[in-house]
Structure formats: structure tokens, C-alpha cells
Amino acid sequence: MKLASIYLPKKDNNKKSLNKINRKLQNDLINCFGGLTSYDGTGAWLDNKTNKFYNEPVTVFNIACSNTIKSKNIINDLAVKYKKLANQEAIFTAFNGTVRIVS
């Protein structure tokens, strides 16, 4: 088994709660992988174009999954789906030690 993670903000770019979308992602991950661990975190980054610093609360979803292309594709597909649903510019993911920013 390998570790995969998806980081989803708690609020959208207009400061609207994403609680319902976080719960939907949780349910999708449980349906795909059988379980997960989630916890609160903070995402922070610097926009190099505007030199603006961002700092926002996130939910981190950790999943134990097989080290297969199928598992990796599920994580990627869910990140793309929830990036759109949450109206985000990017979503941070990790799979087996490799990180990816889905933008």
C-alpha cells in the first residue's frame, strides 16, 4: 500500500464555505478506496506574478491505496473534479512520494 493525499481548501476564493464539497470528496474517496484519514491544515504560497502571499485553511485527505496506474488516475481525476467544483485555480496532490499541483 502507498500513501496518496488530496488537499482541498475549506473556503472558495470568495470566502464561501466548501464544507459540502469537502464532504462529497470524502465520500468519493471512501467509495473508491474504502477509507481515509482527514485532518485540518494550512496551505500557504506566494503568487510570483502579483507578489501576493496566500494563507488558507485546508482539509488534507490521506488514503492508503495500491501503487497502480488505476489508483493514481483516480486521485488525479478526483483532483480535477474537485478543483472545478470548489472553483479553485489549483489543487495539491501527492501519490507515492510524488507531488503534483493540478491546475
Image (cartoon, rainbow, N blue to C red):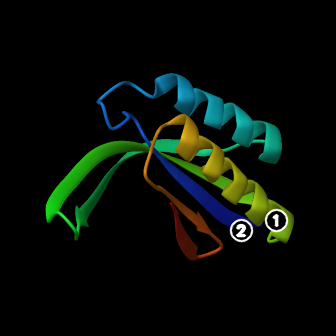
Horizontal and vertical percent position of residue 64: 71, 57
Residue 11 against residue 1 in the figure, above or below: above
Q: Are marks 2 and 1 in contact (CB under 8 Å)?
A: yes
Residue type marked 2: Lys
Q: Residues within 10 Å of mark 2 (few under 14, many from 20)?
A: few
Q: Nearer the viewer, residue 61 or 37?
A: 61
Which residue is located at x 64 percent, y 44 percent?
81
Residue placed most toward the observer, 41 or 70: 70
39 or 69: which is nearer to us? 69
Mark number, residue 66: 1
Residue in the image at 59% along x and 76% along y: 97
Q: Which mark is residue 2?
A: 2
The CA distance from mark 2 to mark 1 is 6 Å
Mark 1: which amino acid?
A: Ser
> Horizontally, is 32 left or right of 60 in the view?
right
Q: Quadrant of the N terminus?
A: bottom right
Q: Nearer the viewer, residue 33 or 45?
A: 45
Residue 56 vertical placement versus 71 (above, below): above
Point 39% across, 25% down: residue: 17
The residue located at (33%, 38%) in the rendering is 13
Q: Is residue 101 left or right of residue 32?
A: left
Is 85 situated above or below 20? below
